[in-house]
Image (cartoon, rainbow, N blue to C red):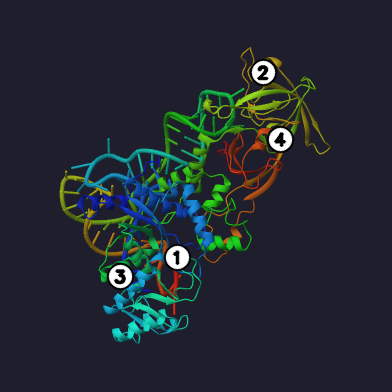
RNA sequence: UGCCGAAUGGUGUAACGGUAGCACUAGUGACUCUGACUCACUUAGUCUAGGUUCGAAUCCUAGUUCGGCAACCA
């Protein structure tokens, strides 16, 4: 990546490990469960996992943590890989599956039993809760905890072979029912779940639990630094216990805080609710904070990576302002997006002294500060469309850039023109504007060198193409939609987060390919939607230009 | 009232015992064939109280506040 990776506390740890000789090479991993789509919160983890490996010339594995077949699906496997690649990271040969280790994990489980460190617990789930107890008081040892190793091996074998119903028993680690850390009060290691697994089919009816599986996966793969989010902090003693008890390679788990952004939600479950209740149009709805949604919206991978670099990695639970993300996106788009003219709220302009039949074409730069990106051809004629708000009866102050009767402005790249009159209907709505142009000012500058206050954009009425514009805005109208725990976050959805309008575009824009990004000058950044065709142009508003100062 | 963790301008993040800096946001101005970009300037911060030290955001003690943890989810 071109972004410089800022240092953080994780890199401090790695530097120390390298200096002390504890590690000689760095291996990280990104371990998604294929049960949903990736969102920008995952992007932070991806940037950290892959970015750290890159920084230390190590490797980063992509490992699907597919230990719960009930929740997982092949659809997500494909989408996750596509999203990571889009973000700009590559796992090369290092694609792994937790499910490929099921055999090894089973062997390790038996080893734990043989060491007297695990037992089959036939207590119903609800009853075990009582034995586990509450944080402030020690729990009690459940029945069966002192069964012999032979008995437990036989029971675990019976579990594996389908001799028990789902939920009839679990394999538990035998640790400490009085531990102040609830996760150490004989946590479940294996449960029985008869579900078809996307990879192993019906080979297993027992599946390992997260804590058991994850530590072993990391260990098998030689992961040196296993980064995860803060909620796993209290799991670390269990992670360490499993690997120490098994006496196998021990990665170091390091926790960092999740990425949160204002005006959106980042929980997979809540995003799923929005999708299922049709409050958005699927996972890739451009309002969603999913990577596929942001991609469709027109956000760039580089901008997301930049954001992740800026927020860095800490243990502080924080909410970053969406403005920071927007700034990263605008910054990237400003450098890379070809310019075009589009009129989103059209009003007709008639140039009374321009020949009726004449059509001129102007060569406008694709990107004014980057001449190497070439030019585009824009037709010009007697009747144009301009933005409704580029005309005003009486200017509020001398900062107004547009037309009023008597005002000369520049039609971007074409001519200087002076407003002479305006047509209005009975309700005082402007119907059309009439102006005269200065033929000497072709290209946009007058030979006498006179300056005009404003430059406005336009499209030729007889040449422009009509398009649907999907104007996107922030998903929620509240900074933190989850702040009020008693309220339903879904009631805080911003009703204006999608507004569909019709616009007039310069003709070349119809030829855009889905995903192509543009800056519509003086308006904002837009990209051709997935549904865009040259017959039915559809553009998504990625972001407006930075809000102008109040006039 | 258990365990774990975190507190630096409005927000995010640096400073690793030695000048509290950067970015975003907001405001003011300059520039401009985009009210964008760019540039300049401005406002504003070390949770509290003690202690160690020539010197503390940083180390120690006590407190305060906030977050996480009691799935056969990850």
Query: Mark 2 packing: few (<14 Cα in 10 Å), some, or many (20+)?
Result: some
Pointer 1 indicates a residue of which chain?
A: A
Select label 4 or label 3 by which is in front. 3
Q: Alpha-carbon distance for marks 4 and 3?
A: 68 Å
Where does the image place residue A348, in percent across and percent down from the top left? 76, 32
What is the count of numbered marks? 4
Residue at disc 2, secondary structure: loop
10 Å crowding of disc 1: few (<14), some (14-19), many (20+): many
Q: Give the mark nearest the N terminus, 4 or 3.
A: 3
- Residue A64 screen position, x and y as percent: 43, 61
Residue A97 visible within the image = yes
- Whole-angstrom CA distance, mark 1 to mark 3, is 19 Å
Question: Quadrant of residue A134 in the image?
Answer: bottom left
* Inter-mark Cα distance, 2 to 4: 24 Å
- Are labels 1 and 3 assigned to the same chain? yes
Foreground residue among A539 and A96: A96
Q: Earlier in the sequence, mark 1 or mark 2?
A: 1
Work out which quarter of the rendered image holds the C terminus of chain A and state it. top right
Mark number, residue A442: 2
- Quick one: label 1 or label 3, which is nearer the N terminus? 1
Question: Which one is in front in this view, the residue at disc 3 or the one at disc 2?
Answer: 3
What is the number of the mark on residue A66?
1
- Give the spatial CA distance, label 3 vs label 2: 78 Å
Identify the element where label 3 is drawn: helix
| Chain bearing mark 3 | A
Q: Nearer the viewer, residue B58 or A42?
A: A42
**Residue named by callout 4:** A388
Q: Identify the residue position indicated by label 3 in the image.
A: A242
In the rendered image, residue A296, in percent from the top left (x then y), is placed at 58, 48
Residue at 37%, 41% in the rendered image: A4
Q: Earlier in the sequence, mark 2 or mark 4?
A: 4
Circle nearer the N terminus (1, 4): 1
């Amino acid at each position: 990546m071109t972004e410089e990776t800022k240092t953080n506390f994780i890199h401090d740890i790695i530097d120390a490990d390298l200096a002390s000789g504890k590690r000689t090479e760095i291996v990280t991993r990104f371990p998604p469960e294929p049960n949903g789509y990736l969102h920008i919160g995952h992007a932070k983890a991806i940037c950290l996992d892959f970015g750290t490996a890159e920084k230390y010339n190590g490797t980063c594995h992509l490992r699907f943590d597919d230990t719960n077949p009930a929740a997982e699906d092949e659809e997500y496997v494909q989408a996750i890989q596509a999203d990571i690649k889009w973000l700009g990271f590559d796992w090369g040969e290092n694609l792994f599956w937790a499910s490929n280790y099921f055999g090894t994990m089973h062997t390790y489980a038996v080893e734990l039993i043989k060491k007297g460190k695990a037992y089959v617990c036939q207590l119903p789930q609800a009853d075990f809760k009582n034995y586990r107890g509450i944080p402030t008081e020690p729990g009690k040892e459940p029945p069966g905890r002192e069964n012999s190793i032979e008995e437990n091996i036989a029971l675990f074998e019976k579990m594996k072979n389908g001799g028990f119903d789902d939920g009839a028993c679990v394999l538990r680690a035998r640790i400490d029912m009085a531990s102040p850390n609830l996760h150490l009060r004989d946590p479940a290691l294996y449960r029985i779940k008869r579900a078809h697994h996307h990879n192993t089919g019906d080979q297993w009816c027992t599946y390992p639990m997260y804590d058991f599986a994850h530590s072993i996966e990391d260990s098998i793969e030689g992961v040196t630094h296993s980064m995860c989010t803060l909620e796993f902090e209290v799991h670390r003693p269990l992670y360490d216990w499993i690997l120490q008890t098994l006496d196998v390679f021990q990665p170091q788990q390091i926790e960092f805080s999740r990425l949160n952004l204002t005006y959106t939600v980042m929980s997979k479950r809540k995003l799923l609710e929005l999708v299922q209740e049709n409050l958005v149009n699927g996972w890739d709805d451009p309002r969603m904070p999913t990577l596929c949604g942001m991609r469709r919206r027109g956000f760039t991978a580089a901008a997301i990576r930049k954001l992740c670099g800026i927020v860095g990695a800490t243990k502080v639970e924080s909410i970053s302002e969406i403005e920071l993300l927007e700034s990263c996106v605008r910054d990237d788009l400003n450098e890379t997006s070809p310019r075009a003219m589009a009129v989103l709220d059209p009003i007709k302009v008639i140039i009374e002294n321009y020949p009726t039949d004449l059509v001129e074409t102007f060569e406008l730069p694709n990107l004014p500060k980057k001449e190497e990106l070439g030019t585009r051809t824009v037709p010009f004629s007697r009747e144009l469309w301009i933005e409704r708000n580029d005309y005003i009866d009486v200017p509020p102050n001398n900062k107004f850039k547009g037309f009023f009767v008597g005002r000369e402005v520049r039609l971007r790249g074409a001519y200087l023109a002076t407003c002479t009159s305006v047509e209005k209907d009975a309700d005082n709505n402007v119907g059309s504007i009439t102006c005269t142009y200065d033929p000497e000012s072709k290209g946009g500058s007058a030979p006498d060198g006179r300056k005009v206050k404003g430059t406005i954009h336009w499209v030729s009425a007889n040449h422009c193409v009509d398009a649907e514009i999907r104007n996107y805005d922030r998903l929620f109208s509240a900074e933190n939609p989850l702040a009020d725990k008693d309220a339903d976050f879904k009631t805080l959805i911003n009703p204006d987060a999608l507004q569909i309008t019709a616009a007039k575009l310069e003709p070349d824009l119809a030829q855009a390919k889905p995903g192509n990004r543009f800056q519509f000058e003086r308006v904002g950044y837009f990209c051709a939607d997935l549904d865009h065709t040259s017959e039915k142009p559809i553009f998504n508003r990625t972001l407006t230009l930075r809000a102008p100062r109040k006039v």
